[in-house]
Image (cartoon, coloured by chain):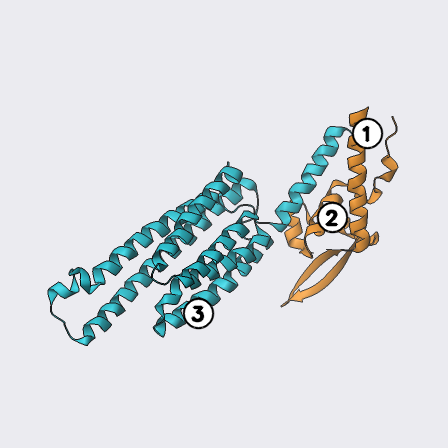
Chain colours: A orange, B cyan
Amino acid sequence: MKVPFEKLDKAFENRLRLQIMSVLMVNDRYDFNSLKELLDTTDGNLASHLKGLEKEEYIVVHKAFLGRKPNTTYESTEKGKKAFKQHLDALEQLIKQQKIN
Amino acid sequence: MEEKEIQNELASIRNLMERSSKFISLSGLSGILAGVYALIGAALAYHVIYDHTPVTGRGYVDNGTQSSGLFFGSSYRLLELELIAIAFVVLVLSVVTGIVLSYRKAKRKGQPIWGKTSKSLLFYMATPLFTGGLLILIFIYRGHYSIVAPASLIFYGLSLVGASNFTFTDVKYLGLCDIILGLVTACLPGYGLLFWAIGFGVLHIVYGSIMYLKYDR
């Protein structure tokens, strides 16, 4: 049985990263606090994975101020969207292959 | 990776995409109740209107205390206030029911009631609704009553179409039906109350039942 594991994106190996990316696929921008609430995670955990995605250039960070409060929002890049789609395709392939075998 | 695991992963992605961009806690039951309130309101309005009409011989004419031209003016002023009061009570009851039931559903689904999606939903709904509401009040003030039924249906329909991007797509079809109904009402003066009862009463009950069967259970 040959499974195309190599096609799966290493950047999405972590579940939270994949979840962040899913949210940014359907929303133009999403802010840190809403993401935290939606994904039910901690500040530190979310921040580190957002950093990871930023390093891959899958997302871009917009820093702004709402009055005096910092308001950080995230947006997915074209590269990120493409990678996400490929990752999903790979997952689909995996399921298909396992069904045949 | 096991197949089950992948399936779970994909299901979680789907779920997140929906939960992050759409307010899926809108309650179907509240739609049904809003329709019922609207029908009761329309029935009350019908009674109020016909109690005020001099031809029926009831109420004001029988009392015979006022017969000058002033009579019509003051009576219609009162009628107007009563109708606005009925409409206002129906509106407040519907909104409160909608908020309470959606709040309960949101809690059950683990979606924040006051989050990013519900804020967008509210904003896109409120813009045409307030525009229409103010426009109608301005026209009532200027004595153009025939605009009330078509304009309230049309603006409500527009607000639903606008809001449908942030919740179930079914809302869009309810909005389109209300817009069409509003335009028909504009062509058929005199049937305003009837169409209003269909648009806000019957359509809400139908739509609410569909939503309830599809998503609430």
Q: CA distance from mark 3 to mark 1?
A: 61 Å
> Does residue A100 sit above or below A80 in this rendering?
above
> Does residue A51 sit above or below A9 in this rendering?
below
Residue B122 x/y as whole percent? 53, 57
Q: Which residue is mark 2?
A: A21
Q: Decide: marks 1, 2 in contact (CB < 8 A)?
A: no
Q: Nearer the viewer, mark 2 or mark 3?
A: 3
In this orientation, which residue lies closer to the viewer: B118 or B110?
Answer: B118
Q: In which quadrant is the N terminus of chain B drawn?
A: top right
Q: Which residue is mark 3?
A: B135
* Helix, strand or loop under label 2: helix
- Amino acid carrying label 1: it is Gln
- Amino acid carrying label 2: it is Met
Q: Residues within 10 Å of mark 1 (few under 14, many from 20)?
A: some
* Helix, strand or loop under label 1: helix
Looking at the image, residue A41 sits to the left or right of residue B68; the answer is: right
Q: Which residue is mark 1?
A: A97
Query: Residue, x 82% and y 45% (percent of image)?
Result: A11
